[in-house]
Amino acid sequence: MTFPIDYGIDLVSIPRHSFIDVIEGRVPAKVLAGKDVIVGATAIELGDRYPVPRFGVVPGVYVQAMATETLRRGIPTTLSFWVAVILILPALIGVVYLQTTIRIVSLVAFSATSIFLLALASESWWSLTASIIPALVVLMFGAIATVAANRLRRTFKASLHDSATGLPNTRAWLRADKAASAAIVLTLPKYDAIVSLLGETDVALFIKRLLERLAPALDDATVYRINDRSIGWELGECDFSQLTQKMASLDRQLLHPIEFTGHQLDVQTGIGVAVIDARGKSAAITGALGAAGYAAQRGLKWHLNDGENRDADERELTLLGELDVALAQEEIFVVYQPKLALESDTIVSAEALVRWNHPTRGILSPGMFVEAAENNGRIIELTLYVLNVVLRDLVVLANSAIHISAAVNISAKLLGDSDFLGRALTMIEASGVPPSQLIFEITESAAILAPADALTSIARLRDKGVAISLDDYGTGQSSLAYLKKFQVDELKIDASFVRNVHCDGKDRILVRSTIELAHEMGIKVVGEGVEDIDCLEMLRTLKCDIVQGYLISQPLIAHRLRDFVLEHQDTYKIAV
C-alpha cells in the first residue's frame, strides 16, 4: 500500500530510547507498557538515513515511526489535482473580470492562501490530500494573462484618446464608422498664448470648458482632439443652407468670453469644413484642418474646403515640397522694378520681386508660393535666398558704377525673428554692400501684429544703416501712432489710392494729406502703381518723392536693370 506520510508529526513527540538501555533494564517497564515499539538502527555508519521535509536527513526508523503515526490516524485519501483546480475556478473567473492589477494580485494572494489552508486542514482533520500546485499554477498563469490583456487593452484605448483631455483622437475618428457628410475642425490660433496664461494642466480643463460652451451647437456629436490646438467632429447629412445655420450657431456660442480660473478669455477660433467624399475621411480631416487655419489667418468665421479648394491645397503642398530643390538649383530668381525720383528724374532704387522658373509649370508669380512658404515655415530660407541674390546683383551694378538702392520685402513673421535678423545682417556685412543701399519693406500688418517685436527689429536694422519702408500704406489699420513709433524712412502709398489720383478727388485728398504728413515727419513717399503720364504728373504736383509702376518700367532681370539705369543715367524721359 502506498500512502503519503504526514510530515507535520513532530518527531519530538515520539519517545526514543537506546536499545542497550532497554536490554540492561535502565528504562523502566512502565515507560514501555502499552506502547508500540519500533526497533531500528540510527547509526550514521549504517547509512539508513533519508531526507524528509521539515527535519532534514533522519534515520529510517524515524520515517517508519511517522508513517505508523500517520496510519494510526487513518489511511489518507489522495484526491485528484482537478479537485484543487475546481476549487480555484471561482477565483480564476474573478481574476479574469477584474480590471486593476492591485485587485488581481490581492485576489490571487487571498485564493492561494485559502486553498493552502484548506489543503492543510483537510489533511489534518479528514486525511484528505490533494496536489494544489497545478491549481496554483493555473491561477498564476490566469492572473498573468489577465494583467497582460488589461495592459494591452489600456494601451490600445490610450492610443485612441488624448491623454490630457480624455477626448478621442484622430485615430479614433478614423476608426469611427458613423455615416457623415463633412468634417468640421475648430482651431485655436492663440493656443500658445493660452498655454502661457493658464499652464499645460489647466489648458486641458479649458478645452473641456470650451466644449461645454459649444455643446448646444454640436448636436451631441462626438468631439475628437486632433492636435494640441484643434478639435473636430462630424456633420450629418445637410445642405449648404443648413451648414450655414450650424456655423452661425457655433459663432453665437463664441460671442462672449469664457470665464476660467478668474480669467475672462475672449477665444479666437478658426473653423474649417471639408466634405467627406470618395477620397475618404482622412482627406476630409486634413482639408478641414487646412480650412480652419485659412479662416484663422484671415479672420474669417469659417471656411469651406470643397473639392476644388482641396485640389489647390494639394498643389500648394506639392510646390512646398519642391521649393527646397528649387532654391538649391537656383530656379528661384529675382526681377527688379525701377523707382524714379521725381525731383531729379533719375532711377534711384528698385524693388526686388521674386519669381520661380518651375521646370513644368513655367514662371510662377510670388502669389503662388510665397504665402504658402510663410504659413509652412519656409519663408526664412526663401527670404535669405532673395537677399543673397540682391546683394550679389548690387555688387555687379557697383562694378558698372551704378549705386542705386534695392528694396527687399520682409514677411511680418520674420520681423520678430532674431535668428533671421542676425543671419541677414551677417550676410549684408559679408557682401561688402553698404547697408544704406538696402531697404527692407514691411507691411502695416507686420507692425500691427507684433508691435513690440517690430519696434525692436526696426531699431536694430536702422542702427545698422538699413532703411525701412512701410509698404501698402492705407490698406490696413494705419494710425499716426504707428508712423511715430516705428520711425520708418519711407512710406509707400498703395496703388489703389495712386492709380486714379489724377481723376478722383477723394483719392487726391488722401494722397496729398499723406504726403504732407510724411514730409512733416521727415519720411519719403513712394507712389505705387503709376501707369499713365497724367497720374505721374499729378504725383509730381503733390510733391511725391518717388514713383514706380509700369509707366516707368516693368520688372527687369538684373542685367536688363543695369542697361536700363545706364540708359537713363542723366535723366529719365517718359515716352509719350
Image (spheres, rainbow, N blue to C red):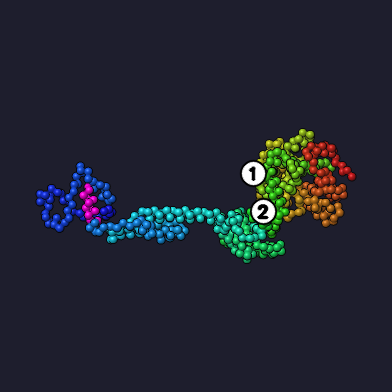
Exactly how many numbered labels are in the figure? 2
Q: Position of residue 209 (x, y in %)?
A: 58, 62
Residue 419: mark: 1
Vertical placement of residue 480 versus 440, above or below: below
Earlier residue among tags 2 and 1: 2
- Do we see residue 457 in this rendering? no
User: Dominant secondary structure of the magenta stretch?
Assistant: helix
Residue in the image at 26% along x and 50% along y: 55
**Magenta-colored stretch includes residue 460:** no
Q: Amino acid at mark 1?
A: Asp
Q: Secondary structure at mark 1?
A: helix
Tell me the distance, in whole angstroms, between the alpha carbons under discs 2 and 1: 40 Å
**Magenta-colored stretch includes residue 66:** yes
- Which region of the structure is painted magenta? 59-70
Residue in the image at 66% along x and 60% along y: 181
Vertical placement of residue 111 versus 467, above or below: below
Residue in the image at 72% along x and 47% along y: 369
Residue 88: mark: none
Residue 279: mark: 2
Residue 46 lies in quadrant = top left
